[in-house]
Every structure is written in structure tokens, then in C-alpha cells.
Amino acid sequence: MTGHVIPPVSAIADVLKLWSLDGWLTPSLYPIVAATTPTIGKVVTVSIVTALAGPGLAPLYSMLSRDLTDRFVVVGGGAQVHGAVWGEIMSTAAHANDASGVLVDGFVRDRPTMAAIGLPVYASAQCVVGPNGTAHVVEVGAPVSIDGVVIDPLDSVVADDTGCVRIPHAELDDVLEASARYAAAEDRVVQALAAGEPLTSAYLHKKTIVDELRR
């Protein structure tokens, strides 16, 4: 997307915290089907509520029927729904339209078959029962909040096998560049330890970059 190397989620989260920004989404979202390498994408957002009547998930189905290249589908509001709001069928549709991954603030199901599909999925937890008509889309393409982190349609998500993080649109290039430097410094610490250097001196590789990046 930007020409940058995609750093690990943990490095991005640490840089965001150094800069007094939020964005780490693990917790409360955990890998159900993990991205095997750091994966980045712009977001397309969907807000759902639980209610006895409404439009159901039809607007979500419509969104999953269009081109999703380099996009993370972000479903907000699902934590209040008593049932899984994502599973094999939706992953199949999103994968067919080239989505980068899925974040679900709520329950998902069908982990084994979703794993076979290969589309990264991050969610609050797993649940075997569906919503049985009580989940309804109220908005597509508007900001959503997951555990206090607001995700705007212009923002980006990075996911890897440890979790996921949101990067604000205005900070994207700066965060990726700083996070790559941060991750490289952590690698130098590990290399120094492997070469027999004590942690007291090896850790200076990381301390130096932390001091440089701190705003």
C-alpha cells in the first residue's frame, strides 16, 4: 500500500503508545484464523445491532459481493449480539472478492472451515449458534468503535499471528516507518543476546530507538 515493509503488530502498537495514540485491538480481538505474515489493508466498516426486527444482514451480504481488494472488513457492534455474526459462508464470499482479512467485534464460528479458506479472521470469541434473525446492519462505511478504539473508514489495519492494530490514516506512513525501525532494533537485541552479549548492554539497541522515537 505505501511501499513500506509491514512491521509486526507488536512494534506498531508500541510506537502508537510511544506517540500517545491508541489503536491496538488485541485485546479484545484475537486470532481465530491468523494472518501468517503481517498483512495490511484499508478498512470497510459495518455497524450491527441486536433487535427483534430490522434489515438483517442483507447490507453486509451486498458489501461482501463487491470488490474488497486490499480491504479489511471491520464489523462493529456485534458484541451485543447473542450468536455468531460471521462464519464460513461470509469468509468464502470475502475471500472470493480478495479481502485482506476480517475483524469482528463479536462472536464467529466455523473456525476449521474458515482456516481452510485462509482468510485472516479476528474476533472476540467463538460461538456455535447463529443470531437467528436478531442481528441487523444499521450502517455501512461509518466509523465504528471496538473496545474504545474508533476505526474510521480511511484508517488501515495491520494483522499478524499475534493480533491486530489500527493505524490512523493521517499517521500511516510515519507509523510504518517508525515501527520498522523499532522492529529492527528489537532484532538487534536478540542477535546480540544470541552472540553472548548480556541483556544489560544488548537492550541498549532498543533503548536508543525508543528514546529517538518518543514524542
Image: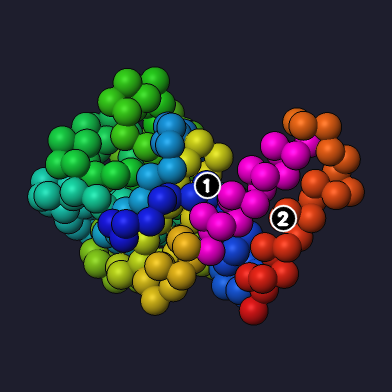
The secondary structure that dominates the magenta segment is helix
Hey, what amino acid is under mark 1?
Answer: Pro
Mark 2 vs mark 1, foreground winner is 2
Report whether residue 60 is seen: yes
The residue drawn where x is 30% and y is 70% is 154
Side (left or right) of 145 relative to 99: right
Report whether residue 49 is seen: no
Query: Could you say which is closer to the camera, residue 151 or residue 162?
Result: 162
The residue drawn where x is 39% and y is 76% is 170
User: Which residue is farthest bottom?
Assistant: 215
Q: Quadrant of residue 188?
A: top right
Hey, what amino acid is under mark 2?
Answer: Lys
Query: Could you say which is closer to the camera, residue 119 or residue 62?
Result: 119
The quadrant of the rendering that contains the C terminus is: bottom right
Query: Could you say which is closer to the camera, residue 104 or residue 154?
Result: 154
Residue 214 x/y as whole percent: 67, 73
Residue 186 is a magenta residue: yes
Side (left or right) of 23 relative to 88: right
Residue 19 x/y as whole percent: 61, 74
Which region shows up in magenta? Answer: 178-193
Are circles 2 and 1 on residues that touch, CB within 8 Å?
Answer: no
Residue 106 is a magenta residue: no
In the figure, 209 relative to 197: above or below? below
**Label 1 crowding class (10 Å Cα cut-off): few <14, some 14-19, many 20+?**
many
Residue 45 x/y as whole percent: 30, 61
Instruction: Quickly name the residue at label 2.
Output: 206
Regarding mark 2 in the picture, which secondary structure is present there? helix
Q: Spatial distance from mark 2 to mark 1, Cα to Cα?
A: 15 Å
- Sequence-first disc among 2 and 1: 1
The residue drawn where x is 25% and y is 67% is 141
Instruction: Quickly name the residue at label 1.
Output: 8
The residue drawn where x is 76% and y is 60% is 207
